[in-house]
Structures are given as structure tokens and as C-alpha cells.
């Protein structure tokens, strides 16, 4: 490998990392050159994160070396990595929630930079790259998309030579992602190296000229993604062909099952979004997609639908005709509704509790899991076992804590938990956020199959590919207002993107049909 | 004349508040780093015994104060090794520390029971100290009182204005995130624990060297616990700790005066008031939490084990 091209800027040779008996990296070689965007591909659990942490000095390899311009370097700590010019944009944001944006950034900046100078640099960078941030806001009040902006700005402020990006677009809208790509291409042209980790193979094909593919801790291939198809890349990652999602056969048009009527909700917090006169209707067999940029009311809409926030009047929300606006989550579940929130850890599942206990948490109202107030642990374990089997949840041990599962597998579990209840109405927020391609395809298929069995499904997602793949029609949530639904076949990504940016009356052009079909294929 | 009576009361309030300020500000720093050290009472009482012993041996109040702070640091170091280094449970270790401190202080102070020495010298500035009404309050205190007040300002400045203070707050908010950024979480926490110990020891030394210039077993009489409550009461803000300590000190003095005046209320009820106020403050704080964010250090009491 080293015979071709100049000395790599950074390289890792023969990296082995063991955690007890488990080998996360097994003899991994990776070479990154200046001025390239290098893709690191692999399923969840393939060892990408371990390798990244080694390059950022968070983990020390059990064997193997890291070199910088051909010299062996020891990355004992992130400071050492930063001193060599390695920056990192974390997927699971490495931010302190109760500190402000500026304070979070100041944590990794040189000590000499005082408050005002730092704010100026944040503002300048924001203008330059379109990454706008209010330095005084506490992080807890920001959406996932805004938090990622902090991560990126924090990384760029250190003027890095190598930037490691872990799933950087997973929370961005297509428009925002385009902006990010422009930034990344510019950074590449400035002569920096970028290591780009993404499950979104079309992005990798667009941005990257070299890719290293990991499977089960080993390098299984290297290629130029631009010479490959998304399908062939995915096949290299998982070792088999990824199932394509089979479109739903049963057309929409059953009876109305879920209805929101002029729902107004004040903002629940200082920086939250109020909901304004939201009306929507989902029929049996229909999948309605809600697109929108993070922080435009998705969390608030989900809370209103699930019953975590009660509506001001009972008839604002109807489930199968019953006015449930003032009733709680269990009452809604008993009527056949099911909910999958965005956050897997802490909202959909309690990370420190076992899978069977997590099954119990969501299903106690609808499954026979308790009798006379006493838990039937056997029944809960049986339910968890069925979910694990049906949805091929990969885990360690018979009934591990939810937090030990990888993101994709935990998502399969929480979605499976709801779908096995055969709900008549399913509300699901960001169904495949940070989930690998194979698991995402499986989850989308499960949602489509549920709709084909007559359920009304509402999918809130920032992933437009996903919505165009599974939804019958799409509405856009912008600043707490919902646009009227447009059938997926009669609109295109550009039109939806305009609505997401706040343009009203973005009527899809008539010629858009063929384009939408091209995307769907 | 009445002005002098007011001043006299205020001076007693200030002196009663000083040990609470000292111990509270130390615990505040420890807790802002995410470590809950319930052993304040133990570190304080050992500081009182050791401080008195050193002062008797050397004849120097200053060395005594240093000895008290040093004893607090030693005990805190033990706590730090257990909870920060070995990831032991903080609540259990803290309670054990209090019991250990009470026991050790009895041992250290055994031969000094009943001895007396001159209280720590008070500031005397010609002209200023004799100012009617305010002179003694502002210019006639001992060094501990001024040190406590300076410490409050210094800690406020450190936490809010310095990089090291920011790092400390970040560690207390989310140790996983700060660790990922390369902050040495355990080192920061250990130093914060040591600082808390030094402050608690100094607070104890103040009791045996200035407040009641003799040593008696268990002489801290629960002040360490009040300091702990104060930190929560103050929602982890330095100036509020000082204000709360003055309030508690005021309540103590008021209770004495009320009992002396033969007021109808039982003294026990009056001395319970500050604790009731703490409970009320906790309720109000948790109400505030609903608006998002966390009033205290989010990682408080959580044990950190880096994966490496």
C-alpha cells in the first residue's frame, strides 16, 4: 500500500485493540493523505469507533503504531492528538449540557484565548462557513443539529490538519448537509485530510476518493467509492447483499385512524418551539412523513402525539375517532397507538435496565405483563425474546442491559417492541438515526409491512431519502407550523427542501415526477 | 449606643457564619467537580483537633491553622483515593469519613481536653477599628474571617473567569464528554476533593483557635452537615453560600437571643428553621429544573471509570 503515492500524512499500521477477550480492531492498516477525504466504512460494531478513538488519543492500541509524516508518534491523550493537528467531530456529541456554547468551545482552545476573542472567532467562523451559533446559549436548550454545529466549529477553530468526522450528516437536513459538504470540500482543497465515517453511502460516493472498509475489526477492502455503487459498497460492509426495501403494495385510503385538529401548544421551554394550528390526518395503511430541520417542533409534535404533553382540548387529537387530547400515554396505547421516540437511550429505553425490563416499561399497559400488581417477569422475558428473534437484535448475553447494545440493535429492539404489539397507529421519530444500512433497511421494511397490515403510521424524520422511500405523502414542519401533505410521487427533494427552509407555497413543478421516481429507485 | 448593640449582634453573626463559609465553599468546589463528599463534618472536626494540637505545640495560631487545613487534606486524600481513584461509592465513603474523622479527632485531641489558649488575634487598625458602629465589624475581625471572605470571591472568580475553573465545572457536568476532550477527569476531581478538605480543616481550626479557643470532642456540633446543606441551598453559587452561611449564623445567634429573651418558641424549633429553609430551597430548585438544564452539577455523585 505504501508503495503508491507520497508519504501519508497520518497512518496506522497493524492496529490491534483488545477489550478483555473481545478484539475490536485486529491488525488494521489505514493511510490518510493530505488533501483527501478518506471514507471509513463499516457496520455498527465493525471497529470504526475504536480506530477513531485510537487516532484521537482516547484509546491506546494493544499493538501497532500510528505515524505522522512517516514518523512513529504516540497518541497518549487527545491533547497529544490535537497538538499534532488531529481534530474530531463526535457523533455522540461530547458537550456539557449545562455549559454555554462558548464555554464548551473554550474547553479545548488554547488558554491564551480570552472570552471576547473567542466569541469573535466563533462568529467569524460562523459567517465564513454558515455555521451560526449563539455563544451564550446553554447547550441543553439546543437541538441535535445545533449541537453538531458546535462540534464542527470547535474542531475547525483548532485549525486541524486531519479532521475525523463521525456520522456528521446524521442530524442534518439535505440543505445543511450540502453546506457541510461544501465546507468539507473546501477544507480538503486547503490541503487538510479528512476521515469521513458515514452510513450514508451516497454521501461517501459523492465526497470521498478512497475508502477503507472494516468488518468485524479487520480491513476487508479498499476502493474508490466513486467507482462503486451504493449497493456494492454496502455488500462489502456487511459481507452479503443488503435487502432492498420492498414498496408497500396496499394503497393508502383506509378509514382515518389518527387525526390532529388545529393543535396549538405553547413552547414548553425557553428555547423550545410552539406548535401552531397543526392539523393532520393519517388513514389506515398510510404512511405520512413529517420532514423538517431539527428544532422546528419535531420533539414537541411527538410529545403531543404520544401524550407526554397533553393537548389543550380533548378533540384536538383523535385516535380511531376517540377524542384523547387530554388523556395520557397509557390510555392512548390501550386504544392501539404505539410510540417510538427519537432518543434511544433515556427516552425509548432505560440504558441500565435489562431488555426484558425495557419491554415491560413500554408494554405494561397493553401486554399481559402484570397480574394483581405483581410483575410477570417470565412473560416480559418471553416478550423481549420474541422481539430479539423477530428483529434479529444482536446482543451479548441472554438479557443484557439496554445500554450495552449498539445503536442499530437497540433501535431494532425499541421499534420491534412496539411493532410486535400490532398497533393500529404508530408514531415514530427519526426511525433510523445513526443506524447502519442493513438495520435501517430492516426497520423501514418493518414499518412498511405494518402499514400494509392496515396501521396508520406517522414518521418524523430528517432523512429525506428515508421519507421518499417509505412515505405515501410528506408534510413539512417548519417553526412549529405544518405544511399540507403532498403525495410523495408528486413532489421532489428540492420542493421539500424549500419548505424545510421556510419557503411557503413551494408548489412542486409538474416535471418533478420523473425525478422523484429516479430517487425512489 | 444602639448602633453598637447592632454591631455586636452582627459580629456574632459573622463569626458564627465563618466556619460555615469556609467549609461550604470547599464543599462547593468539590461538588462542582462532581464529587459529593459527605465527610465534611469529619474533616472539620479533625481539623479542629489537629489545629489546636499544633497551635499548642508550636504556640503559633498560624501554624495551627495550617495544621488544621493539613489534617483536612489528609482525610480528603483518603476519600479521594477511595472514590476518585478506586471508584468507590461516594455516599458510603463520605459517611465513613465523618465517623473516622470524629474518632481520629478524639485520639489527636485526647491530651488537650480542658486546655485553653488565647483566641486568634483580631485586626486592630488605629482609627478604623474604633469607628463607632462599624469599626469592629469591618476592621476588627481575626484573619480567619477575612480569609473566608477572600476565599468566596476567589472561588467565584476561579469558577467563572478562569480556564481551570471552566474545566472543573465541565468535569462536574459530564465526565464522559470532558474525558473525550482530553481533560484529566480524575486529576481535576482529586484536586477539588483536596481543596474541599483543606477548607473543611481550616473551618475546624477556626472553631478551636478562634471561635471557642479550646478543644472539646465533637465540638463541630453538626456544622459540617449544615455546610453540606448550604451548598445545595446556595444552588452551588459561591456568593449564595456566603449569604446562606450568614443566614444560618444569624439563625444560630437569633436562637440564642430568643432563648435568652424567654420567647415562647422552643429553641429547638428555631434551630430547625435553617434546615426547613434548605428543604424549601430544594423543592424550589427542583421546580426550576423543569424548565430544562440542571441546577447543580449534573454528574454529582457519579463515579467515573475511564475506558482505556
Image (tube, grey):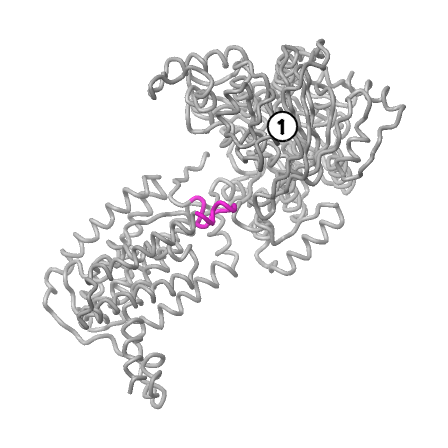
Residue at (70% x, 12% y) in the render: A248
- Residue stretch rendered in magenta on the structure: B287-299
The disc numbered 1 marks a residue on which chain?
A: A
Residue at (42% x, 17% y) in the render: A397
Q: Is residue B114 visible?
A: yes
Residue B307, position as x, y percentages in the image: 45, 34
Vertical order, B156 against A454 (above or below): below
Residue most extreme to the right: A511
Residue A159, position as x, y percentages in the image: 68, 47
Q: Residues within 10 Å of mark 1 (few under 14, many from 20)?
A: many
Left/right of residue A458 with respect to residue B36 in the rendered view: right
Vertical order, A314 against B134 (above or below): above
Vertical order, B281 against B82 (above or below): below
Total marks shown come to 1
Image quarter of the N terminus of chain A? top right
Q: Nearer the viewer, residue B112 or B132?
A: B132
Write down the residue under mark 1.
Answer: A430
Q: Nearer the viewer, residue A74 or A285?
A: A285
Q: Which quadrant would residue B91 be assigned to in this image?
A: top left
Residue most extreme to the bottom: B127
Majority SS type along the magenta span: loop
Residue A187, position as x, y percentages in the image: 74, 41
Left/right of residue A515 with respect to residue A136 in the rendered view: right
Q: Is residue A27 visible?
A: no
Q: Which quadrant would residue A276 be assigned to in this image?
A: top right
Amino acid at each position: 500500500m505504501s508503495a503508491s503515492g507520497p508519504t501519508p500524512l497520518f497512518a496506522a499500521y497493524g492496529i490491534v485493540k483488545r477489550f478483555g477477550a473481545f478484539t475490536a480492531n485486529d491488525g488494521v492498516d489505514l493511510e490518510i493523505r493530505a488533501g483527501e477525504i478518506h471514507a471509513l466504512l463499516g457496520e455498527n460494531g465493525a471497529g470504526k469507533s475504536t480506530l477513531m478513538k485510537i487516532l484521537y488519543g482516547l484509546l491506546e492500541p494493544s499493538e501497532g503504531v500510528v505515524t505522522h509524516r512517516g514518523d512513529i508518534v504516540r497518541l497518549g491523550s487527545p491533547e497529544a492528538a490535537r497538538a499534532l493537528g488531529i481534530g474530531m467531530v463526535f457523533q455522540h456529541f461530547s458537550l456539557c449540557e449545562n455549559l454555554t456554547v462558548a464555554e464548551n468551545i473554550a474547553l479545548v482552545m488554547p488558554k491564551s484565548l480570552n472570552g471576547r476573542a473567542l466569541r469573535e472567532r466563533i462568529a467569524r467562523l460562523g459567517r465564513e462557513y454558515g455555521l451560526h451559533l449563539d455563544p451564550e446559549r446553554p447547550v441543553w436548550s439546543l437541538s441535535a443539529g445545533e449541537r453538531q454545529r458546535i462540534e464542527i466549529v470547535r474542531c475547525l477553530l483548532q485549525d486541524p490538519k486531519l479532521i475525523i468526522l463521525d456520522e456528521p450528516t446524521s442530524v442534518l437536513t439535505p440543505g445543511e448537509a450540502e453546506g457541510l459538504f461544501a465546507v468539507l470540500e473546501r477544507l480538503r482543497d486547503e490541503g487538510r485530510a479528512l476521515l469521513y465515517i458515514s452510513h450514508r453511502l451516497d454521501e461517501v460516493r459523492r465526497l470521498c476518493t478512497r475508502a477503507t472498509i472494516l468488518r468485524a475489526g479487520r480491513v476487508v477492502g479498499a476502493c474508490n467509492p466513486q467507482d462503486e455503487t451504493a449497493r456494492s459498497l454496502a455488500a462489502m460492509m456487511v459481507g452479503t447483499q443488503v435487502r432492498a426495501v420492498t414498496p408497500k403494495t396496499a394503497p393508502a385510503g383506509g378509514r382515518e385512524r389518527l387525526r390532529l385538529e388545529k393543535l396549538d401548544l405553547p413552547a414548553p421551554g425557553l428555547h423550545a418551539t410552539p406548535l401552531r394550528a397543526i392539523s393532520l390526518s393519517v388513514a389506515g395503511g398510510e404512511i405520512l412523513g413529517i420532514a423538517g430541520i431539527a428544532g422546528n417542533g419535531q420533539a414537541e409534535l411527538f410529545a403531543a402525539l404520544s401524550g407526554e404533553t397533553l393537548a389543550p382540548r380533548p378533540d384536538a387529537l383523535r385516535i380511531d375517532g376517540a377524542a384523547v387530547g387530554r388523556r395520557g400515554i397509557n390510555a392512548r396505547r390501550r386504544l392501539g397507538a404505539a410510540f417510538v421516540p427519537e432518543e434511544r437511550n433515556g427516552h425509548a429505553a432505560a440504558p441500565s435496565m435489562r431488555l426484558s425490563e425495557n419491554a415491560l416499561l413500554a408494554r405494561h399497559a397493553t401486554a399481559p405483563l402484570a397480574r394483581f400488581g405483581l410483575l410477570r417477569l417470565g412473560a416480559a422475558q418471553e416478550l423481549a425474546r420474541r422481539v430479539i428473534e423477530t428483529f434479529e437484535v444482536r446482543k451479548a448475553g441472554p438479557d443484557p442491559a439496554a445500554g450495552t447494545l449498539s445503536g442499530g440493535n437497540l433501535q431494532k429492539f425499541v421499534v420491534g417492541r412496539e411493532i410486535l404489539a400490532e398497533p393500529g397507529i404508530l408514531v415514530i421519530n427519526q426511525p433510523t438515526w445513526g443506524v447502519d444500512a442493513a438495520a435501517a433497511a430492516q426497520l423501514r421494511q418493518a414499518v412498511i409491512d405494518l402499514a400494509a397490515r392496515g396501521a396508520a403510521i406517522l414518521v418524523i424524520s430528517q432523512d429525506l431519502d428515508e421519507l421518499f422511500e417509505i412515505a405515501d405523502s410528506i408534510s413539512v414542519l417548519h417553526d412549529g407550523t405544518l405544511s399540507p401533505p403532498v403525495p410523495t410521487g408528486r413532489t421532489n427533494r428540492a420542493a421539500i427542501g424549500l419548505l424545510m427552509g421556510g419557503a411557503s407555497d413551494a408548489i412542486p413543478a409538474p416535471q418533478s415526477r420523473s425525478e422523484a421516481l429516479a430517487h425512489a429507485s | 449606643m444602639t448602633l453598637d448593640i447592632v454591631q455586636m449582634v452582627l459580629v456574632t453573626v459573622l463569626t458564627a457564619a465563618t466556619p460555615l463559609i469556609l467549609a461550604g465553599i470547599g464543599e462547593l468546589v468539590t461538588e462542582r467537580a462532581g464529587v459529593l463528599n459527605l465527610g465534611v463534618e469529619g474533616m472539620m472536626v479533625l481539623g479542629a483537633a489537629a489545629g489546636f494540637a499544633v497551635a499548642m505545640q508550636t504556640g503559633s495560631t498560624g501554624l495551627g491553622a495550617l495544621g488544621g487545613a493539613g489534617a483536612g487534606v489528609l482525610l480528603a486524600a483518603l476519600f479521594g483515593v477511595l472514590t476518585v481513584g478506586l471508584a468507590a461509592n461516594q455516599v458510603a465513603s463520605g459517611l465513613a469519613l465523618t465517623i473516622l474523622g470524629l474518632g481520629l479527632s478524639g485520639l489527636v485531641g485526647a491530651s488537650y481536653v480542658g486546655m485553653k489558649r488565647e483566641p486568634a488575634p483580631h485586626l486592630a487598625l488605629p482609627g478604623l477599628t474604633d469607628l463607632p458602629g462599624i469599626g469592629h465589624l469591618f476592621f476588627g475581625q481575626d484573619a480567619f474571617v477575612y480569609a473566608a471572605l477572600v476565599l468566596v470571591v476567589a472561588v467565584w472568580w476561579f469558577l467563572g473567569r478562569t480556564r481551570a475553573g471552566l474545566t472543573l465545572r465541565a468535569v462536574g457536568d459530564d465526565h464522559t464528554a470532558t474525558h473525550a476532550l482530553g481533560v484529566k477527569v480524575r486529576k481535576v476531581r482529586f484536586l477539588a476533593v483536596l481543596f474541599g478538605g483543606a477548607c473543611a480543616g481550616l473551618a475546624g481550626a477556626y472553631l478551636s483557635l478562634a471561635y471557642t479557643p479550646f478543644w472539646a470532642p465533637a465540638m463541630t456540633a453538626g456544622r459540617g452537615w449544615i455546610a453540606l446543606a448550604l451548598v445545595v441551598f446556595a444552588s452551588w453559587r459561591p456568593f449564595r453560600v456566603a449569604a446562606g452561611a450568614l443566614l444560618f449564623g444569624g439563625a444560630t445567634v437569633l436562637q440564642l437571643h430568643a432563648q435568652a429573651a424567654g420567647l415562647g418558641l422552643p429553641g429547638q424549633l428555631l434551630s430547625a428553621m435553617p434546615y426547613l429553609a434548605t428543604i424549601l430551597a430544594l423543592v424550589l430548585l427542583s421546580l426550576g429544573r423543569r424548565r430544562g438544564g440542571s441546577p447543580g452539577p449534573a454528574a454529582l455523585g457519579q463515579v467515573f471509570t475511564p475506558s482505556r
